[in-house]
Image: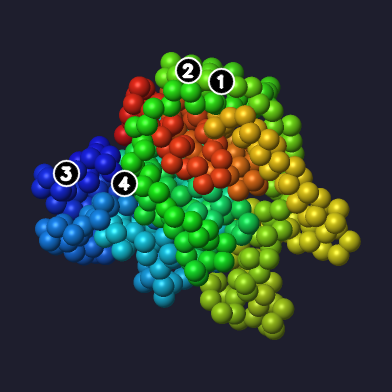
Amino acid sequence: MHQLTIAEIIRGLRDRQFSSVEITGHLLGRIEQLDGNYNSFISVTPELALQQAAAADERLAAGDAPALCGVPLAHKDIFCTEGVRTSCGSKMLDNFTPPYDATVVENFNNASAVTLGKTNMDEFAMGSSNETSYYGPVKNPWNSNCVPGGSSGGSAAAVAAQLTPGATATDTGGSIRQPAALTNTTGLKPTYGRVSRWGMIAFASSLDQGGPIARNAEDAAYLLAAMAGHDPKDSTSLDRPVPDYTAGLNGDIAGLRIGVPAEYFSDDLNPQVAARVQDALKEYEKLGAQLVEVSLPHTHLAVPAYYVIAPAEASANLSRFDGVRYGHRCEDPRDLRDLYMRSRGEGFGEEVQRRILVGTYALSAGYYDAYYNKAQQVRRLIKQDFVQAFEKVDVIMGPTTPSPAFALGEKKADPVAMYLEDIYTIAANLAGLPGMSLPCGLVNNLPVGLQIIGNYLDEARMLNVAHRYQQVTDWHKASAA
């Protein structure tokens, strides 16, 4: 049962091949048995899951069930869940139990999906390897000595290990697409504002976006359909109709114009990864697509611009964690200053502290114009590059990551080397564009991801393009488990 995709589970539940209670119990047993090898979950919720599964079975029997009714899923531990600890991978929130659900979680509850638990993540979503979590690193199911990517490494590893058929995740600079690439899963970051951020603990508010990780594009389409939509509680939420993402999956892509940026095939790219991506592009040509050279000349500025903007926003967002209202509080503070300093020093890990300091510096008097304002100007140039490219092409393709999964601990002591793991993904966040990663091959038995970047609100086309590739290839079916 754990090998079933979301689409297969949906059909199996409706054909009465199994019940939601049965498949939920099977996956809970698998998590208990195997997750000690991966550390992909922070919290597992068996009682809640079986209760939801029983209710879903009743709804299925009544015949009024939405598509995801009874489907077991997991949520990244950045989404608030009523009555269930939401830690954001941090000691700061180790004791935080929200009194409400994030809109994304509420949407899945309304669809009668089943919550298996909360997945591990880099602390406050700050990391590219899932090694900064207070609860320990997540291990890649393809090689337990390697990282699964971050910050949504727990969600990606849980899907790759077949502990759950799908999971929610978030992407601030590549944190859905990069772990999807390193674990042979399919991950999609929607257009900024397509998925509500209400109840999703903030890292960088102008960049954060929730999305799904699943085994294939069809499953991602089902998950995105539940996640997307306008939310009046989120001022950045887009008030646009949500299309039926599954309806157009099989559409013909003959004549599709694929932009291939030269900047994505530089010396920074592992040659074997480049070869797998080129093989994927040839498959698209066989499907009738046309490859078009495009230029994104400001790509090399994406990483430095991001690592000014994101820490600046993080320093503001994380100022609320002060040991006063909720979260970690130091023992026996001498005075208010001591309370603030020790609570934050004890509650935040090294990477989070580093980014808070960088962000505070960039926003400080005398440096705002030199750093933060300049980074925002660069951001505009990057966005304009994409606007001009999409005048000539329908989608843009290239590698998701510069190399396959790297060893645990290999880059932890070198923050700059770690930051460069997101060199191909960050630009889409800065521009607010949708992007996704799908499996396109293996290098030394480690997965490689193909990145698709779409135009604004063009998730349906991206999913169609990804699905057609997965109909003629089997890379997404390769399993680490």
Q: Are marks 2 and 4 in contact (CB under 8 Å)?
A: no
Element class at badge 4: loop
Element class at badge 1: strand
Q: Say which of marks 4 and 1 sits in front.
A: 1
Q: Are marks 3 and 4 in contact (CB under 8 Å)?
A: no
Which residue occupies the foreground of this view, 477 or 409?
A: 477
The three-letter code of the residue at mark 4 reads Thr
Residue 170 place in picture, x, y as percent = 50, 51
Residue bearing mark 1: 291
The three-letter code of the residue at mark 2 reads Glu
Residue 108 place in picture, x, y as percent = 34, 59
Residue 248 place in picture, x, y as percent = 36, 38
Q: Residue furthest bottom?
A: 335
Q: Earlier in the sequence, mark 3 or mark 1?
A: 3
Q: Earlier in the sequence, mark 3 or mark 2?
A: 3
At x 48%, y 23%, the residue is 255
Up/down of 355 relative to 285, above or below? below
How far, Cα to Cα, is label 2 from label 4? 34 Å
Q: Is residue 185 visible?
A: no
At x 31%, y 63%, the residue is 110
Residue 164, numbered label: 4
Residue 10, numbered label: none
How far, Cα to Cα, is label 3 from label 2? 35 Å
Q: Mark 3 Cα within 10 Å, few/some/many (few <14, many 20+)?
A: some
At x 42%, y 37%, the residue is 463
How far, Cα to Cα, is label 3 from label 1? 39 Å
Residue 285, numbered label: 2
Element class at badge 2: helix
Residue 12, numbered label: 3
